[in-house]
Image (cartoon, rainbow, N blue to C red):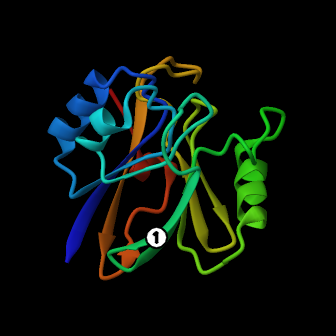
Amino acid sequence: MVKKILICSDTHANNNYLKEAIAINKPDVVIHAGDFCCNLSVINEMVDYIVAGNNDTQGEEQLYFSLFGVNIFLTHGDRFISYFCNSKENAQRIYDSIITKDLNLIVYGHTHIECVDYVGDVLAINPGSISVPRNRSSRKSYAIITIKNNKIVEKTFEEIIRYL
């Protein structure tokens, strides 16, 4: 069983780029790491799992769930991370705050800068922003991971991060 998951964050009410990424990739599941900045019912039509960001008024602040055999912790990240820390340090801060350590994947956003890191064996992904990027190239970013036989297939930044 091979499943494709699209991960995005920080759409800030501009859902056109998310729609484009979904059309291009045809994922089995879409995960949104917050700051959707629109009515939750609108974004729920496009995504399967979502958390509220610091600019949202609806939704859960964090979720822990299992998807195709992969244990995932989803948060916007604003309560855990610092702009003064590098991505590896921010991933570690999120990991350290989680009660259960039975994880394979941490997904977060907030910084609008894409990154892929490991905390031990746990993959941590910030897909950046699909509508308001703050990366050096100003390219809109999102992530794609593939799960096969209950394991994440992609392992590197270049395999995971995509641009519009």
Rendered image quadrant of residue 24: top left
In the image shown, does 122 or 82 lie closer to the viewer? 82
Label 1 Cα crowd, 10 Å radius (few <14 / some 14-19 / many 20+)? few
Q: Is residue 3 left or right of residue 10?
A: left
Task: Name the spot of residue 27 as percent of width and height, x first.
Answer: 22, 52
Q: Is residue 141 left or right of residue 111?
A: left
- The quarter of the rendered structure image containing the C terminus is top left
Rendered image quadrant of residue 25: top left
Rendered image quadrant of residue 145: bottom left
Circle 1 SS class: strand
Q: Is residue 126 above or below residue 100?
A: above
At horizontal 35% and vertical 20% (from top left) the residue drawn is 14
- The quarter of the rendered structure image containing the N terminus is bottom left
Q: Is residue 145 above or below residue 57?
A: below
Task: Name the spot of residue 61 as percent of width and height, x first.
Answer: 59, 50
At horizontal 58% and vertical 21% (from top left) the residue drawn is 134
Question: Residue tagged by mark 1?
Answer: 65
In the image shown, does 28 or 89 lie closer to the viewer? 28
> Total of numbered circles in the picture?
1
Task: Name the spot of residue 62 as percent of width and height, x first.
Answer: 57, 55
Q: Amino acid at mark 1?
A: Phe
At horizontal 66% and vertical 77% (from top left) the residue drawn is 100
